[in-house]
Image: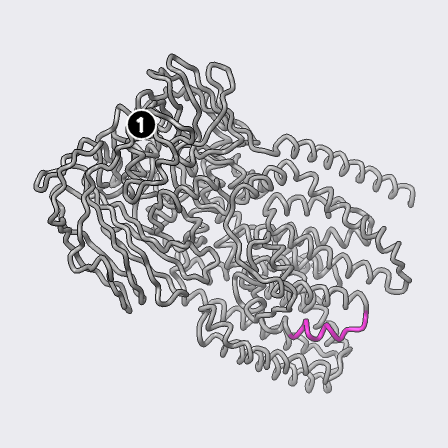
Amino acid sequence: MDKVKRYIPYLLLTGLTLFFCRMFVGRYGIFGAKVDWLSQHSVLPDYFRQQFYATGKLFPEFAANLGGGQNIYHFAYYGLYSPLILPSYLLPFVKMSDYIMAVSITGLTASVLLFYYWLKSRKTDAGTAFILSLMFLLAGPMIGQYSGQIMFVDYMPFLCLALIGVDRYFEQEKSGLFTISVFLMIMTSFYFSIGGMLALVLYGLHRYFEQREECRVTVSTFLIDGLCFVRPMLLAVLMGSFFLVPTALALTGGRSKGQNISLASFIIPQITVERFAYSIYGIGLTTLVITVLLTGLLYRKVYEKVLTYGCVIVLAIPVFAYLLNGGLYIRDKVFIPFLPLLCYLISIYLEKCRKRELSFIAGIVPYIITTIFVYIARNQFVSKGIGKSIWKVLLAESILFLICYVLYCVMKRYHKEAKEILMLALPSVICLAVTMNTFYQMNPDRYVSRKLYRDVVGEQNRQAVKEALKDDDGYYRTEQMGSDDENAADLNRIWDVDQNITSIYSSAYNPDYQTFRQKIFRLEEPFRNGMMQSVSKNPVFQRMMGVRYIVSDSDVPGYTLVKKCGTTGIYQNKDAAPVMYATDRVMTEEEYKKLAFPYNQTAFLEYAVVGEHTESSDQNIMTAYKPVSMKKADTQDGWRIHAKKMKKTTFSIQQLQQKTTQQGQCGMETAQGKKQKNRVLFLKLRVDNAHPNKDVAVWINGIRNKLSAKDHVYYNENKIFIYAVPLKDGEDNISVTFGKGKYRLRHVQAYLGSLPERSELLYQSEIQVDKKQTEDNVIQGTIRVKKDGWFITSIPYDKHFKIYIDGKETEIQKVNTAFLGCKIESGNHEVKIIYHAPGTTTGKVLSLIGIAGFVLVLVREKRKQKNTR
């Protein structure tokens, strides 16, 4: 009977976890949030699995399908070797998105149960451990991030296991569980494993001084014991080097920019209520944790001081947040790994209250200070847009906790057992359940509706992509295009290993490709996050990048419907450039830089741009794109917009009176009145935002450009809105939607013209790819080059590529300002392109050393255990 009772808390916690998952998230749709969950955390693992099925390689090096072609370690953060993702390779019949939901809920449940087990192993009262486990479950980032940015929390079961492993290390002198848990934590989420290891160090110090409470500790013994304690973590890092080394080298190549932070702000303590209370991007507890930390500063025992002071220093001094964020910015998300420790500190506090080790004054003053602090910090929430009234909720909550403490002190005077200790913890659980649920109710749009989920992951999309690729022997790209929500969901979505896309959404990326999209070519930026590089509706970019097929539920300008799969159409553009070709029609990069808008875009349809001097171009590419004026718009003063909600209007395109009769290089006639095909309106304008901390968006014929708020952590810097709007035959009006806000659109430049047909002068020789030999990091094929010239690709340049022509390595060069190319002579050639991710060999060698060291330590510990018996 006692054994049965022992399992009841675990069953109750499992049931409550499922209940709150349903209450907080499930009732709004699926167990997944929009954007990051839908476009990163659920699709990139599926891409890894597809690559494994296609190649049989567990250690891939190149992601040819994403972002034009990238180092696969740019995406390593999203579960490349995660122990949670790898089992899905055995389940090809299960959709990865469904698998991710199942493993997320399972991981959340396992975290709560392991946390309860850990507290119980630390001799915590069963009732207190149960309440604290609920507090741990209901903390902001747990359900909030397990259904959103999974990598923020999916390491949590292994962190809890590591805490148990630390206890075993000190109590039984066994480090196996400690090492394995840290290793699994690194494999799951290397970014947050650093904060997790720091939390383990603090807990290790706590246990070390607790174990030696009655012993004198010298500096030398402390250092020696400290090195022994760190050894299991160092071995775990070495064992994970096959993953960490190439990932570290990939991160140095390209990643998001950091914030400009002054030196003084690194060391001046910075404490915000949001860091501790409710936020899903912070620790997410109640203000009780602030009270507990303040109370802990008064503790007398060294092992209690070490843990409390350690947590306070890490949480208060900004340099720790900066370093844990990889030197990018100061954000609270890196403190999520400290959540178990802070809950543990609450258990220590409750135990002290139960044993009456705190005086009334020492107990009540921290509550008063917390209440005052919440009131003083009320403006923090307004400035961060959390809500003008949320500070009132926090203030009411802190007053409630103060009253509960006073009542508890009164009641314990008359009850010697003082079982009323739960009066101090239970209100936090209730406040978390009510307030967090209220937050979620206020923002149901955060989650993926069942309809959007069906639309995005529907099998007809997969079928349409496969049909598009089935009968095409060329090397082209196939994109998906839909609403803004669907485009966000499809940023990294690959339905078939032969499908290649131009879009990418990752915290690391090829810097040349990113610069080309944002600074050189200046594609539209539909999202506030600058790293979300969407499928582009720019017809010039589509052609240049070889986007021959687009899968969409609606008509795609410039593309012809060739087949339907249910409601999804397959659209084709035969004018799209091949991904790899040979040509002698080139211009220098110096000449290219002199081109003004829109010729800096259209030039790529006429010439390849190379870095070396050449005499083969005639330099006359000022094609007949005629300037036009937008009726109702002054090109000097532009539009002044002050809209409280979105405003939709229609503008006419009126050509200027000055007639242009020049015949452009595209072969396009420009006489007015002549009917033209493939017409495109090129539009450029500058955005002056009167409220810089609010987003601004403008749609033209459904093409969105957005300038994000300046204080947004991934500020996109999109102050110049550029559009290339495909027009239907005879279309002289465009639909313009002004997003809400107060801003001015100035320096309006507009040009109208028609795109040329596919240029045989430019695409002289197209490569014939051998698809059987092309996989993972190798692209192989044959090409018949008509004239000495250049081998041009639309694969982003990376110095770790090697190109072999007829078996001989050829010097690679950057072409079209950002892409891979080289010189090539006329004749028939075999071309082989190989990419080696830097650091893979070194990482594997270090991993073998780490595994060997781990085995030796286990053997040594086993022998030591035998000798002590």
Q: Is residue 824 above or below residue 17?
A: above
Q: Name the residue furthest top.
A: 827
Under circle 1, the secondary element is loop
Residue at (39%, 32%) from the top-left corner? 794
Which residue type carries mark 1? Ser
Q: Position of residue 512 (x, y in %)?
A: 46, 39
Number of numbered labels in the structure image = 1
Residue at (77%, 73%) from the top-left corner? 299
Question: Which stretch appears magenta?
Answer: 291-301
Q: Residues within 10 Å of mark 1 (few under 14, many from 20)?
A: some
Q: Position of residue 205 (x, y in %)?
A: 78, 59
Residue at (43%, 27%) from the top-left corner? 821
Q: Using residue 254 as the reference point, say whether residue 579 is left or right of it.
A: left
Can the viewer see residue 85?
A: no
Residue identified by numbered label 1: 617
Q: Using residue 99 as the reference point, say whether residue 169 is left or right of it.
A: right
Q: Position of residue 801 (x, y in %)?
A: 51, 28
Q: Nearer the viewer, residue 495 or 667?
A: 667
Magenta stretch containing residue 736, yes or no?
A: no
Q: Quadrant of the N terminus?
A: bottom right
Say which quarter of the image contains residue 442.
bottom left
Q: Position of residue 823 (x, y in %)?
A: 43, 22
Can the viewer see residue 276?
A: yes
